[in-house]
Image (cartoon, rainbow, N blue to C red):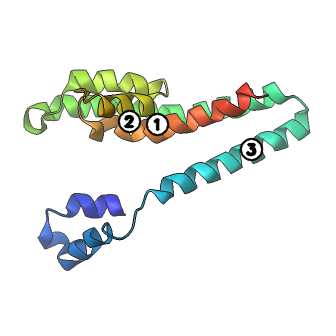
Amino acid sequence: MGYEFTHLAPCPLLLGKITEWYLNTFNYVSYWAGVDIFLAISGFLMFKIISKEIKTNGRTFYSFFHFISKRIFRLYPALIFWVIMSVITAWYIQPDFNANAKLALSNAIPSLFSYSNLFWYNCSVNELNCGSSDLSGITWSLSLEWQLYLIPSIFQ
């Protein structure tokens, strides 16, 4: 909800005093806890699903591989679709919004190979021109989630 209010803030006719009140809450409250809660719930559910499968099958590697393959087939079709849409969008809006289709395409690679969080961190810290993070920057959380899935597999 914060995302919508933040983007509609320049339109006072749409939101009026609500926008002013909402944007002032950022002075008192940080909403990043939602990411932490999401990762905690995701980790708990991942562990619960995999441990249930290990009890059923008795095979640790097979259970982990089965879990990961189900996640890939559930998440990657949507990810691929939206990565393609972000490149097409960048191509159409590039003259008006300073978007760059070539950079959007190069930003798609970290998104698809699950190192988007490291990519955007590197762009931010080293002040690189990596294009607009509005198109595919949000995939950092999915990349972090995949990296956190790999940690239990290393220690098995």
- In the image, taking residue 17 as reference, residue 135 lies left or right, namely right
- In the image, 47 versus 77, the foreground residue is 47
Q: Secondary structure at mark 2?
A: helix
Q: Tell me which corner region of the image, top left, top right, bottom left or bottom right, holds residue 70.
A: top right
Figure check: 87 above or below 133: above
Q: How many marks?
A: 3
What label does residue 47 carry, if any? Answer: 3
Figure check: 101 above or below 51: above
Q: Tell me which corner region of the image, top left, top right, bottom left or bottom right, holds residue 83.
A: top left
- In the image, taking residue 63 as reference, residue 2 lies left or right, namely left
Q: Quadrant of the N terminus?
A: bottom left
Can residue 73 be seen by looking at this rendering? no
Query: At label 3, which amino acid type do we have?
Result: Phe
Q: Residue at x 23, y 21 (%)?
A: 102
- In the image, 125 versus 109, the foreground residue is 125
Query: At label 1, which amino acid type do we have?
Result: Ala
Query: At label 2, which amino acid type do we have?
Result: Trp
Q: Nearer the viewer, mark 3 or mark 1?
A: 3
The image position of residue 111, as x and y in percent, is 42, 29
Residue position for label 2: 82
Contact, CB < 8 Å: mark 2 with mark 1? yes
